[in-house]
Amino acid sequence: MAVAQKVKERMEAGSWIRRIFEEGAALQQKYGPENVFDLSIGNPVLDPPQGFYDEIRRLADDPAPGMHRYMPNAGFPETRASVARQLSEETGIEFAADDVVMTCGAGGALNIIFKSLLDPSDEVIVFAPYFPEYGSYVDNHGGTLVTIPSAEGFLPDVEALEQRISDRTKAVLVCSPGNPTGVLYGPETLEELAGVIAAKEQELGREIFLVSDEPYRRLLYDGLEYPHVFRFHERTIVATSHSKDLGLAGERIGFVAVNPGYEDSAEVVDGLIYSNRVLGFVNAPALMQRVVARLQSATVDVPAYQRKRDFLYGKLTELGYSVTKPQGAFFMFPKSPCEDEIEFMTELQKRRVLVVPGRGLGMPGYFRVSYSVSDETLRGSIPGFTAAIERYRN
């Protein structure tokens, strides 16, 4: 066998998105790309803000000596300082450059966090539904992912969390606004969540980290403000990227920020820097570090995403779909009109509409829709959604 058994098993378990991609490619070849409505992939459709292109031109026209060489594994000091200044402004907490490690996107950020924190058999708790790669990220470093179903509205079930935390729990992982739900955890939710974690730390005599995956935190709608987790729990680590807020998914640039109020934060940062090096990331991309250093307060055209959300949410609810209205990100997670969402997904595929089944995200009976697509694709998908649900209504 050429591929390790564990890898083979995880490839099979996580194959839904790949399978849908392949089916979509076949449909496009048969019917033409303009007649296939692929809402399965969370690929940012909005281009970066103008400031990104201005900064690229400035650096190309006036390159600094050694601009593309190695730098400290944590990243350029000036870039880390820029991130720290922005975090200080947003949170009201004083961050320093030494609290930040630049990473190869949020995926790289989460991997160096778990490499730094986890001993063999340690557990990381996550609420379903969740981004499917979390299981692999935790397994990469000897840990076990423990899944707890969400409460109503896809908010954390804190009672279930209280019952499930054990002397093997090292971290609770959250994503808000979430993939695949778009639901934002408000201050009350975070306070309740942190309260359970703190009480369990006291009971078990064990530190438990709150790890927050935040690639969508600037994609918020309806005038909502982001409640930063640092104020709610001392042992908080944030992983994020500029894939979505600056439209730079392919550039793989992000960072980790460790709560400066944690007494052992310097030790955690040292672990992150070591892990960045030995996992082979070495450092975040040099050019992108220099670019984003000047774009920490910039974003893509967020109202454009909100208009897409409003259009699709309005159409789906009008047709009779049960959908929790997203407050951010660019996904929604409707309930399948039939118990088996694979069956319903097949009905949509017959009408050349592609979505992701909820079981691939830890919650059968639902399906994920990405509205990070062109307006033409969104409008073109509506007849398929209409015909599919009509089949079950009749």
Image (cartoon, rainbow, N blue to C red):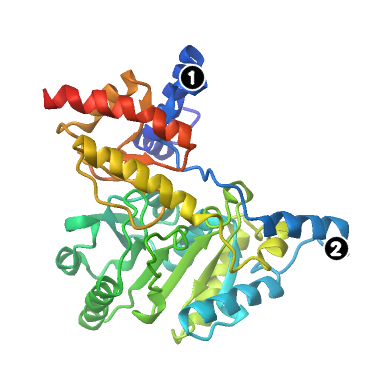
Residue placed under numbered mark 2 in the picture: 66
Q: Amino acid at mark 2?
A: Gly
Q: Residue at x 24, y 44 (%)?
A: 363
Reply above or below: 87 against 373: below
Residue 135 point in image, percent of width and height? 37, 50
Q: Quadrant of the C terminus?
A: top left
Residue 15 can be seen, yes or no? no
Closer-to-camera residue (69/300): 300
Task: Name the secondary structure under disc 2.
Answer: loop
Q: CA separation, marks 2 and 1?
A: 45 Å
Q: Is residue 3 left or right of residue 139?
A: right
Residue 98 can be seen, yes or no? yes
Task: Name the secondary structure under disc 1.
Answer: helix
Q: Residue at x 45, y 38 (%)?
A: 41
Residue 36 point in image, percent of width and height? 44, 23
Reply above or below: 203 against 387: below
Tag 1 or tag 2, which sits nearer the N-term? 1
As drawn, the residue found furthest toward the left would be: 394
- Disc on res. 28: 1
